Amino acid sequence: MGNVIGPNAIAGLTIIIPVIILIISVGLLTGVGAASIISRSLGRGDKKSAQIAGADSIVLNFGLNIIIMVILYVFTDQILKFLGASSEVLPYAKDYLSIMLFGFIFFSFSINGNNLIRAEGRPRAAMYAMLIGAILNIMLDAFFIFVLKMGVQGVAIATVISQIASCTYIIIYFRSSSSIFHLKPGMFKINKSISREILGIGVPSFLMEAIWSVLFLLFIRVVRQYGGDIYIAITGIGIRILDMIFMPMLGINQGFSPIAGFNYGAKKYLRVKIVLKEAFIWISG
């Protein structure tokens, strides 16, 4: 892709990574927090609390993302320059962000929704939601970049469309008989107690991603100082390779959490220890 859209374009995509991480962190804040409550509630047979937690997480996720989107829209240039975009890279970063801005809410909803689906014990449905987005993104990237020659704008459009597709699948699933949620408009009434618990549980996951975002920002500043935009582009490629390496560990963690939560809610503490041990062995091995 670098030979097609150029190193400055790749650098522009890399500059946006801290913003992408922020959107991921919001999805994890609400998704991980709600998933813990859902799995524990289902473990003790409390379906109602699980449904409330799921609905509250969607409302919280939507509200937080609207705030972020407004800030990014109003202060686009200032934020991109703060992130380290040079005058050569800024147009590419701005083209990408201006389109991605409208897809962030779908991206974060997908992360939140996947956590909810896994928490109710449907990992295959969560996998389908991710695969739909990933496969469609690859196909559309090729179409927009190589056929339509749209560059970074094409990459952004492909990403937004793929996230909308994932969201559509998740919404259809939530409204089906397979899900415990059966989403209806009347469900979206915030329960203050459960919402506080969602945010309290999700904060560690949020902070881990937020800290990584800050570290990446600082790293980009150092790279730009000593190597310029071409080194930023190389860094972006390296980050995507590292993501692929760490993906299996992330998958094990996501598979472990709902099982542990369900058994904890059912007061089957020995099973929690066994699952924790198995997860640790798989990650270490």
Image: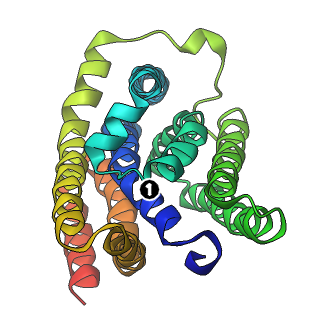
Judged left or right of residue 247, residue 162 is right
Q: Residue furthest front?
A: 87
Task: Where is residue 58? Give x, y as percent.
Answer: 49, 27
User: What residue is shown at x 42% (from left), y 76% (from top)?
Assistant: 237
Name the quarter where the N terminus is drawn. bottom right
Foreground residue among 57 and 274: 57
Q: Is residue 33 visible?
A: yes
Judged left or right of residue 285, residue 74 is right
- Residue indicated by mark 1: 88
Task: Where is residue 171? Give x, y as percent.
Answer: 67, 36
In the rendered image, which quarter is residue 269 located in?
bottom left
Q: Is residue 36 visible?
A: no
Name the quarter where the C terminus is drawn. bottom left
In the rendered image, which quarter is residue 276 located in?
bottom left
Judged left or right of residue 173, residue 240 is left
Q: Amino acid at mark 1?
A: Glu
Colour basis:
rainbow
